[in-house]
Amino acid sequence: MTRIAPPKMRLGTCYYPEHWPEDMWADDARRMAEAGLTRVRIGEFAWSRIEPAPGNFNWGWLDRAIAALHDAGLGIILGTPTATPPKWLCDQMPDMFAVDADGRPRGFGSRRHYCFSHAGYRAQAARITRAVAERYGNHPAVVMWQTDNEYGCHDTVLSYSEAARDAFRVWLAHRYGTADALNTAWGNAFWSMDYRSFDEVELPHLTVTEANPAHWFAFRRFSSDQVLSFDKAQIDILREASPGRDVMHNAMGFVTEYDHHALGAQLDLVMWDSYPLGFLEMFPFDEADKHAFVRQGHPDIAGFHHDLYRGCGKAGRWGVIEQQPGPVNWARHNPAPLPGMVRLWTLEAMAHGAELVSYFRWRQAPFAQEQMHAGLLRPDSAPAAGFADVKSAAADIDTLGDVGGSVKEAALVFSYDAEWVTATQPQGEGLSALWAAFHTYTALREAGINVDIVPPTADLTGYRLVAIPCLPIVPGALAAGLQNFSGQVIIGPRSGSRTAELSIPPSLPPGPLQTVFPAAVARSESLRPGTIHRGTGWTATRWLDHLETTAEAELIADDGQVVSWRHGAVRYCAAWPEGALIAQLVRRAAKDAGLQVTAMPQGVRIRRTERYVFAVNYANAERVITLPGEPVVGSPTIGPAGVTVFPRSTNRN
Amino acid sequence: MTRIAPPKMRLGTCYYPEHWPEDMWADDARRMAEAGLTRVRIGEFAWSRIEPAPGNFNWGWLDRAIAALHDAGLGIILGTPTATPPKWLCDQMPDMFAVDADGRPRGFGSRRHYCFSHAGYRAQAARITRAVAERYGNHPAVVMWQTDNEYGCHDTVLSYSEAARDAFRVWLAHRYGTADALNTAWGNAFWSMDYRSFDEVELPHLTVTEANPAHWFAFRRFSSDQVLSFDKAQIDILREASPGRDVMHNAMGFVTEYDHHALGAQLDLVMWDSYPLGFLEMFPFDEADKHAFVRQGHPDIAGFHHDLYRGCGKAGRWGVIEQQPGPVNWARHNPAPLPGMVRLWTLEAMAHGAELVSYFRWRQAPFAQEQMHAGLLRPDSAPAAGFADVKSAAADIDTLGDVGGSVKEAALVFSYDAEWVTATQPQGEGLSALWAAFHTYTALREAGINVDIVPPTADLTGYRLVAIPCLPIVPGALAAGLQNFSGQVIIGPRSGSRTAELSIPPSLPPGPLQTVFPAAVARSESLRPGTIHRGTGWTATRWLDHLETTAEAELIADDGQVVSWRHGAVRYCAAWPEGALIAQLVRRAAKDAGLQVTAMPQGVRIRRTERYVFAVNYANAERVITLPGEPVVGSPTIGPAGVTVFPRSTNRN
Amino acid sequence: MTRIAPPKMRLGTCYYPEHWPEDMWADDARRMAEAGLTRVRIGEFAWSRIEPAPGNFNWGWLDRAIAALHDAGLGIILGTPTATPPKWLCDQMPDMFAVDADGRPRGFGSRRHYCFSHAGYRAQAARITRAVAERYGNHPAVVMWQTDNEYGCHDTVLSYSEAARDAFRVWLAHRYGTADALNTAWGNAFWSMDYRSFDEVELPHLTVTEANPAHWFAFRRFSSDQVLSFDKAQIDILREASPGRDVMHNAMGFVTEYDHHALGAQLDLVMWDSYPLGFLEMFPFDEADKHAFVRQGHPDIAGFHHDLYRGCGKAGRWGVIEQQPGPVNWARHNPAPLPGMVRLWTLEAMAHGAELVSYFRWRQAPFAQEQMHAGLLRPDSAPAAGFADVKSAAADIDTLGDVGGSVKEAALVFSYDAEWVTATQPQGEGLSALWAAFHTYTALREAGINVDIVPPTADLTGYRLVAIPCLPIVPGALAAGLQNFSGQVIIGPRSGSRTAELSIPPSLPPGPLQTVFPAAVARSESLRPGTIHRGTGWTATRWLDHLETTAEAELIADDGQVVSWRHGAVRYCAAWPEGALIAQLVRRAAKDAGLQVTAMPQGVRIRRTERYVFAVNYANAERVITLPGEPVVGSPTIGPAGVTVFPRSTNRN
């Protein structure tokens, strides 16, 4: 048993023995192993089969399933089944459900039907976790644990239940001490919102017009904390009952309702669930990209999350525990990946330093909610289209072996509370700190630069470029770190614009960043689509910060509007960091930082490790990429969904 | 008294004596008769005037109204008033309302404010039905009954009340016997959704994410059954108390929430309510058609429903009980029909074999919800614009007399559960079995082919072509029927893709249809608008089934994607059956079937009866149609809203 | 103390001493006075600071704040704080909240969290009003009162609470006397909607389909009356306790849920809150205008409301109590005004006869809901961008002095119940009497014509042109007035189309207007976008009234459709009054009326007073306006956001 990540990336799959006749298990396990898989995740939705009636445990089937998988040499990642409490448990505590913003309980019938603040459910979750952990905690097949499943999926972090309200009041009392302190912190003199005691505070929904943004922001902080403490309770039980095993959780794509950095700090590692086609369809990519990448996913979806979750995991440990292997069932439209995409996604994860890529799911289920979600096998057990990709990827992984450590170039600073600020107080429709980060990430990757997405408290040593796309609340540590930082810095709009209690800093924005950038934002405006300040090769859109500053104007629009400023090594982007504007600033800063800028052909991305440079082609056409050395995998001409891996010379490339 | 349909189509109107002073009734009746009307529907919303207080009946006014109409020679179609229970009754049983999917009771103040599952309301509905039937059941003026009014209007089939929940549990117990059987049928091992007893089952709404589609599907089946049994209770009373009269119900356009084939089986005939302009505006026609046919309606709206409801009625008996006579009040925009359209709609119904066309309503009411809904008369009793059309149509009907029986060419298979499957599990936004049927119907009619829309259990003898646009659940009878069928067959995507319990067949789709088409659908994908596989004169969009098959590829897109396959007389359309693609397949199959293909000029449709070929022009411009023989009505050059009727030679034309 | 409006327009601001440390008050007051402000509004949201616990008053801070402002020579407009009841009060009466149309209470946490029908809250509102009035009613600094704040803001007029339902029943009993009378008035025989007593009547929401429009209309009338009586209770207390002071209320932009004419009749004057940029973004202006005027606001937003509220105020007294001074926080996008716009808006109000323009707010608050709403000062107390505009406007006002009285040219008739009719019964999506009025107003102002927006009961003497864009309910007084009117008249569609109980008049529309225009509307249709009848330089869209009339057809579309009719001095516009069509009719009628038509350059508006002609330029480019005389302010070439004021010769110009 070891907690050290393997030098070579592993493959795995997600399996549900409870869905299939027992006589299929051994053959399934054998086929998994033959395909090159060494890990299998099970159990995370099986509560009703483990405990079909209160206190009546049925371990036999799970004992035998684990044995069958173990016999084939597979290491098991065992999930606590708390995302799917059985109906009998819900009937015992009908108030355990989360309540939506309209006041409706979110009842039984699918999954995640619980409120993180319900003490009764917390006790039940601890009880079943302990039961599973005690039964299998020392089983030699069990190599890792997963807590619950996909916290936040289906918008389940924010709950408006009575349990949540009561817990919020306790949380507030702990944070503020007195109602007067809360009134002052939130500015409750405004609109006579003063409270005389914490018992007067309600949840911020269903108000006549918007509630105080400080109220919403506190509720978001509280809600994130509830996820963390729910999770921590399971971790503590698992560590006690299953010593030597890693504990992880499976995070999702574009989910920001709880603080993943804080989650990562209490786990051994963070994994995530990668569904590039579904994400492309469901998230606000522009229509041209949705068309161009319909069977590939936008080229930065996987990379962004790889680099984000690597920054969440302890010592950079992370993996993909659910990898899309074919069409899914849950997007508005559900196309199939291009042939080769499953291999591409697998090797791209390797390039970003994953220790595991596990496909969801082994076999497509013919029943229930996900019957149209592909597996590696079809419902009739024949190999599905993605299966060949997996075998091909397994061979490539054998060829490549250990990719070596990470290569530090640019750090992109993102914090979850940044997104909570822009969600609470967008000031202009569609403005989001997360998407500012995503677009800045794209600009960096299109310039061929390695990115680490880091929290504001990260050590910046070793980076040549730091981008802070939109960080309203700047911790003192970051401001201090930047003062000692010798590389280039790009600060985006709204950064430093809020105190920790969501008010405007007395010195005006960028507040704490004034120590590295001498300016006050005198006025900000948000702009409707179509209101454009044009420059040479770029446009300023969506947001404008008007600065009083001694910095030098760097980019000036044709109409005289200053769009970016420069003060030594620090740039301030006054419009929304997107498209050609942030690309322009990234290229300027990278050049000043001495970073090599490699303009990527459309759809191509490269990623450097200590031993290799990986190039992947998300375009639906051939691309040529020329780098020094003879490719170890593939060739300089890369077909759609193709991957080429160059050796990395000691000279940077 | 006879139940035999008249050889010549009748005309009628819908009249509300309770809305007008008693001294207007006799004159109204006289003017109806003079206009050529012989039927008048009354009474279906009059409960509060029949029984103004509990048990306090006021028959006098209705006795006199019936007498006045009878005196003018009109046959009366009497409605049971159960669609509009009075306020006093609702106050007696405040839980009788249906509940919407958000949990809100749908209260008094308009109509259809009852839940089909409420036992108390069922008793009240039976009581008032019996009272009306006993008073007028043997009245010589009463020639037909209508049960209730427009089941399903305003989305009233699915109710989430406690009454519905309790009845659903009983229905489930009857269907599945044990909770374990239900768990197995639905695949409830997935996400720990197992039930220990039927009392644990909730309705499938307000779950955190989608409920099990099998759960939703069962709820839809149950909800349809509740409509049927509610209706059957009235039929039984009416047949007992009013022997020799027909009982019908007025179905609607594009309503699929209950099984109209099953309803038709328990009634004597089915009628429907035809509002082509309102339907064009409110349903998902494309914008170009909404523009081109804004004052006509799409040319297949009326025909589709005529052919659908003829297939629902016993022995093909059907009629139009409500025909739009001018602008309506309920669409987003409410234009007036072109001059002549009311005549066109009337004669088109005759071409499809209607036994009655009845206009809604006689006189426009100056008050309440429908005050902007046109009648044959204006509120000031002057003739409204549609009135002249009716008189003109009456003259044409006299000219034509008996049109003769139906001419069998193509059968289009549609089932209501097909639509429930695609509504429950669209897998791609906007995919609907009903609209697949509609678009296939258009392709057939644009080729000049007569269509019968039939249930999957229909006898296919005599047809030359069978189209199955999208039929997920294929009954054994259909598979068997197709094995013995000698004509051409077109199978559309998703057909045979589900078992009766909404899971994927073990042999993969098309499941039971594999007996006539040797294939397995290895993978399906849904495509966003803009993802297009282009062929020669057609495009494949929205859906792709990827087949493993020994069939011959027939249509292949420029990119190599096979879009349709052919195995002997059976074709499989692997993309969504719409537009030029299904038109291409229909023309190929029709040619192979020996059917005459007549390409319709834009907006023109023809329909053959034993004695005539009717041609109608929905275009907003003149069209020329050349068929053998001298027109009996009109001429080969047909103006907008024009109708031309050719005699039908014994040689097919 | 005087109630007479000053000959020269005053300036003021809105100030919240409770938001700032007491040691800032005196300096703030000094800076206000130095900037040329003479009025300051305070107190309207301060309940929780005035009465922090039940019955526990804390007057000290307010005493001192008033003293500080008074010491600087400022006159105080004191608000009753009833728009923001404190939490302790809400907790005493949890049923005091309004309830939304979905049945959800609209709780504490922002503002306006009360139901106008709640008797308990009415008593509390009277109690706090009396307390404030008794304390400060005779204070020499207090020159005016404001009742509550922005009735109707955040959709707060219509409440579906039990209190509202009970009060509605009482209101109905008062209006109709008996349930039978109500049944007859509403046409409740339709769909068995008869009531046996007023206790059976529910509120019209949450019905299965639309409730009777007469029911909705009565509920709207009732809801307006509740606002009026709530307001009247405060007026009575204020007049008693604070003799000699004016009482006003601050109305809003595009709010129509209560009858502002009736409100104006009980107040001393009406003021309004002018936010042109926010209104442009949030209301249905077309995209081209939203783009062209993004930093100016549509050129008719301010003028329309100035002319509307002048017609609501007693003797034409009105003002702007909240003027946007920079970006706001509440629109979808929140740009900054062009430099100069705050001055333009100020002088434009002067041109329309305002007695006060007061900027909202003095200093931007760094906390709570409006922290992104600009003030005259920034949060750090430095002058914000708008401050210079105010000082510049103050100088212009000194230059101009008394502008003289109003110049009568055109009257535009608008009534609030007209909008209630079109909102209740639009018959075509997006049709609104308010917007018909707005578009007709634009046509008049683009022709350089002064407009008074007047209620239907107004005296029309002195006007040369009367436009009635859409007035479904025509009071007898208006019909009589028009018979004696010697100028030109334009009647728009749907005018005279409804009785006072929302039914169609027996003689058909235009009902009472048939005395001046001999016609009956035989049929009306609403048209979807894209259905267009084209004429020469105009198009007829959205609506068509088909008339039987002896009038002369004036505008006829290329397809023969008559779009406007003329009978002597009266024109009838049969299509929706918008764009080039209403512009055409306005120009024809103005010419016939002998009014001078001055075609405005894009974005320019002029307004004549007895002494001046003001020209303002909303365009984002220079414009030239040539009028007789040498400008007193500005020059004939007017830059963006520029204002030029010409002297007015005795010859009309």
Image (cartoon, coloured by chain):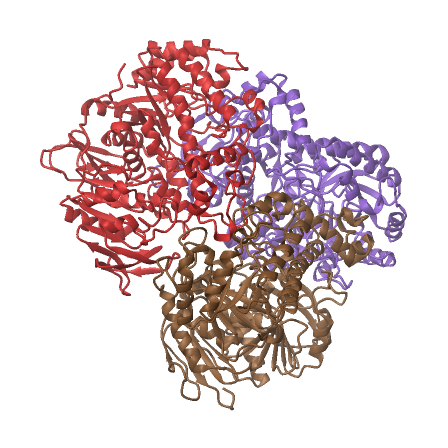
Chain colours: A purple, B brown, C red
User: B582 and C138: which one is in front?
Assistant: C138
Q: Is residue C323 left or right of residue C612?
A: right
The residue positioned 65% from the left and 27% from the top of the image is A168
Name above or below for residue A377 compared with residue A178: below
In the picture provided, is C590 more to the left or to the right than A516? left
Pick whichever, B615 or A559, lies toward us: B615
Tally of numbered tags? 0
Instruction: Please tell me whether residue C479 is drawn above or below residue C251 in the rendered image.
Output: below
Instruction: Indicate the position of residue A98 as horizontal and vertical percent values.
Output: 67, 37
**In the image, is C27 to the left or to the right of B59?**
left
**Is B351 left or right of C489, judged from the image as shown?**
right
Q: In front here: A280 or C465?
A: C465
Q: Is residue A494 above or below residue B148?
A: above
Residue C424 in the image, given as x and y percentages of width and height: 43, 46
**In the figure, C372 relative to B107: above or below?**
above
Does residue A651 appear in the picture of this structure? no
> What percent of the width, then of the height, locates residue A44?
78, 45
Is any atom of residue A97 visible in this view? yes
- Pick the quarter of the image with the N terminus of chain B: bottom right
Residue A541 in the image, given as x and y percentages of width and height: 43, 41
